[in-house]
Amino acid sequence: MLTMQDKMNTRVHENWVEQNFEWYRAAWIECGELIDHYGFKWWKKQDPDLQQVRLEAIDIWHFGMSALFQPGKTVEEIAGEMAAELQAHQPSGLGVREATEALALDCLQSRGFSPSLFWDLMLASGLDFDGLYRSYVGKNVLNFFRQDHGYKEGSYIKNWDGKEDNEHLVDLLESLEASDPLFAEQVYAALEKRYRETVLN
């Protein structure tokens, strides 16, 4: 996933690591969007949308991994540090809102990203590591797909046949096997087919 994230970020900006973008800021803002999907308004009836909560968690993961890259540090070194942090971590048992707030607070205070606090959020939202990988690869491929179809230029159409592309992605992922070595390529091909059928025709 780190390698895929590096490729995506390089697609947007060739020297992205040296640019020192504020990835932590993007991550904590996504935390706010996540809580909005879960619900926080005690003054009105709200039903948590856990599917959208998990999608927001995947967006946080994109920004969080990006925040861990530093000039001169290899993917293998970052992965090793993440693994060591997770092995030493005792899950907090916090609920979705509290785990999200803890992660956002850490982003703001450290101007970085904590994989262990993200794991707490995963556990709270019912997202396991297989689900993280499946959804991450799907969203990563969707981000490449968007770039290939004019996202940066503003010509990409995000709503297909009355649904956002994220929703189409969720539908398509259900029919594909994440353990397949060609999983990413299959996701892209499925997106391309549906985009052509619903938007370009």
Image: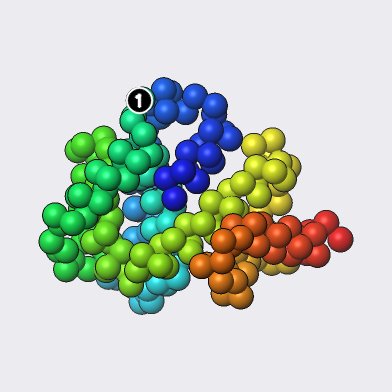
Q: Residue at x 65, y 47 (%)?
A: 146
Front-lying residue, 41 or 66: 66
Q: Taking the image as drawn, is residue 79 in sight?
A: yes
Q: Position of residue 192 (x, y in %)?
A: 73, 58
Q: Position of residue 86 (x, y in %)?
A: 21, 55
Q: Residue at x 27, y 59 (%)?
A: 119
Q: Is residue 148 above or below residue 201?
A: above
In what element is the residue under mark 1?
Answer: loop
Residue carrying label 1: 72
Q: Residue at x 44, y 50 (%)?
A: 1
Q: Quadrant of residue 193?
A: bottom right
Q: Position of residue 4 (x, y in %)?
A: 50, 46
- Which amino acid lies under the numbered mark 1 shown in the image of this protein? Gly
Q: Taking the image as drawn, is residue 167 in sight?
A: no
Q: Is residue 175 above or below residue 33?
A: below
Q: Is residue 46 above or below residue 107?
A: below
Judge left or right: residue 46 versus residue 140.
left
Q: Quadrant of residue 169?
A: bottom right
Q: Give the quarter of the figure containing the C terminus.
A: bottom right
Q: Position of residue 42 (x, y in %)?
A: 27, 70
Q: Residue at x 65, y 42 (%)?
A: 147
Q: Quadrant of residue 54?
A: bottom left
Mark 1, Cα crowd under 10 Å, few <14 / some 14-19 / many 20+, is few
